[in-house]
Structure formats: structure tokens, C-alpha cells
Amino acid sequence: RVHGGSRMFCHLLVLTLAVSQDKPKRLNFKPDGTLKMLHVSDTHYDIPERACRNIDPSPYPCGHTNTTDFIRRLIALEKPDLVVFTGDIVDGNTHPSETGMSELYGCAIDAGLPWAATIGNHDPQSNLNRSQIMDVILSLNLTLSQLGPAMTTHTYGNFILEFFADATATQPLMRSYHFDSDTQDESINDAQVEWFKQVSADSQIPSIAFYHIPLVQYEIALNESLPISGSINEAISYQPVDSGIFEAFKAASVKAGFCGHDHVNDFCVLFEGMQLCYEGCPGYQAYGQDGYKRRARVTELREWGQQIVSWKRVDDVPATTIDYEVLWSADESLLQRSLTNRVPIPPGKYQKLPHFEQDIEFTRRSSERNVLDPRL
């Protein structure tokens, strides 16, 4: 495994948006027309040791290895083709950040799996700023992550993956879009939206998107009492300014979006034709909720990109599978049958849910951290 602790690259800061010249990394569907990915978000992997939080009473010690043990067990059970990390992998209690990142991303690297990572709001709170965090990600083995376009804003690691029928195919059947996502007023900002519009303008193939902070549409959907799969246990800490990314997603045939940030939410809701999903939190040093077990989402692309199926694995003895469902299908009847299993949350329940500590971080501007980056 390559450790990227001291290797930092110097990238040119361009004062106007430039569409990335990086060619999207490609993955091929397996011969049976499937491609499976494991989602990992909000591990808050803290070293030296920090106590686990909101766990069931146990005679056994609990620490950062509980998180990596769970992720490695999921990799062994699910045998994914790709691991997608969606931010808050490390935080201000990870010392140094590059060691924590190497160990956590190492769950995929040691299994010989390609992986892709973007940054959340807590990752740059230790010894590395956002651009340095991305430099470490880019230095590690088997990563499909890319720096992405140069922007006037402090955003690093916006990129595309493309999925092909096989190694000889020249046209992708599906795409995934990956966004740097911070707790500024616009966690996906205007420059990122413009980049997305440009790179997706010539594509109407089915796509999915990954971002750390939920969109405001998650809350709008709940306020409209739309049915959900999974559970909701805390209020949604969405970006306060709607940058228009949701409308851009719909225009570009993005069928599902996946986020983290709110650790004890794991639901999906269909809103205006797009599935808005949480990924679940596998991190034992992250805040949780008593009685709510750590979990992670698994998503499988099927029928060579004509169907998206998803479920979650819970960290109990059998690693129970829950909430198996079709998120999207070219065969509309399959989706409609799956939606019949969803239920609306009881009237008034959402308005009574608590905001956990991460919402405190969300309301705090992170500009004081940006002075550490000489390119801003």
C-alpha cells in the first residue's frame, strides 16, 4: 500500500471555471451485466484511539478497528466491484490525517478493489486542508478519484466514472458523478453546478450522483409526506442555499443521489423522478443513536445499466440485509412494485426530530480553515 502522507502536489489555480481535461475513469460491467458498489461515509476514523459512541453495552473493547473490521467484513460478504467513499472519513480527532486515510481507504486497497473518494465537511479539520486531503487520496493505490476542474472556489475532487459493457466498448452505458461537498452556504456551489451542466450536456444515459451533504429536496420530500424506505431519526442538515443542482440532475437523467452527513438517517425517498438516499453510517467513533446499529449501503447496477437495486447491511452477527429495493428500472413496473413497500412517516414526526451535533458544524462557516490553503 502506498502511503501519501508527505507527498503534496502543486496544482495551478485558475480564476475562471475550466472544464476538466481529465478523462473519466472507466469500469466494466461483469459478464452477467451487473456492477456492485459498497458505500462508505462518515467513518470519523480517529487515531490515536477515541472511544466509540452510542454503542450497545458490551464486555469487549471498541475503537477505530471496529469500523475497519465492519467494512472489511462487508467487502468479504458482498464482494463489490467498487468502493465509494463519500466524505467525513477522518476529522479533527485524526492525528495525522494521512495515516487515518491510508488505514481506512486501505480496506479497499488491501482487497485489491478500485475505489473513489470525495471530501466531506469534517475531513480537513486536522493537519491537512482540502487540497492536501485530495493530494493524499490521489497518491494511494487503486484510486479512481480525480482532482477535477480548477475552480475559483475551494473545491477539489469533482469527477466522473463511466461504466461500459465490456473492455472493448467505446460508449458508456452509465455514469456516476462525484462531488466535493462542504458546509458552506452552497455545499455544491454554482461553479460545480456549471461544471456538471457542461460535462453532462451530451449525455442522457442513466446516472447516479454522490455528495456528502444532503440537498434541500430531501426535506421538501418529507414535508410533502412522500413514502420512504429505511429510517429517519434526525432532522436533515441540508445546504441552506439551493444552488440548482437538483434541477440539473433531473435534466441529465440522474436517477439516484446518495449522501451521508446525518449519521442516523438511512432512508430513500422518490422526489420528482429522482431517488434521494442516505448511505448509512458504519463509523463507530462517529455519533450514532442508542439502539441504532452501524450500517452501510450497497448498490448494484443491473441489466447493463438498465436497473439500479440497493440495500443495506447492518453490523450484527449475520450482517443482516435490510431494505432491499429497486431504485430505478427501465421497466417502470419493477420500480412501481418496489415503491409499494414504502410508507410515509407519521404526520408531524419529522418536525419533532432532533438536530444532532453535526448540524452545529453545518451552521459554522469554515472560512477560517481556508486560510491554510495558499491557493485560495
Image (tube, helix red, strand yellow):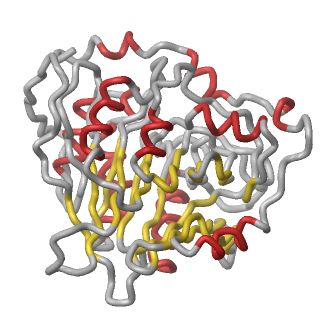
- 101 or 15, which lies in front? 15
Question: Which residue lies at the image location 43% right of the left edge and 50% below the top edge?
Answer: 209
Q: Position of residue 332 (x, y in %)?
A: 61, 70
Residue 279 located left or right of residue 129: right
Which residue is situated farthest in the right direction here?
347
The answer to whether residue 40 is visible is yes
The answer to whether residue 47 is visible is no
Q: Position of residue 364 (x, y in %)?
A: 53, 14
Snapshot quadrant of residue 197: top left
Question: Which residue lies at the image location 57% right of the left edge and 68% below the top edge?
Answer: 310
Which residue is situated farthest in the bottom direction here?
32
Q: Is residue 242 above or below residue 74?
A: above
Q: Position of residue 53 (x, y in %)?
A: 66, 44
Q: Position of residue 143 (x, y in %)?
A: 23, 57
Q: Is residue 355 above or below residue 341?
A: above
Snapshot quadrant of residue 94: top left
- 150 or 7, which lies in front? 150
Residue 271 located left or right of residue 170: right
Count of numbered tags: 0
Q: Quadrant of the N terminus?
A: bottom left
Q: Is residue 285 above or below residue 30?
A: above
Q: Is residue 127 above or below residue 52?
A: above
Question: Which residue lies at the image location 25% right of the left edge and 38% below the top edge?
Answer: 198
Residue 344 located left or right of residue 195: right
Q: Quadrant of the C terminus?
A: top left
Question: Which residue lies at the image location 45% right of the left edge and 27% below the top edge?
Answer: 187
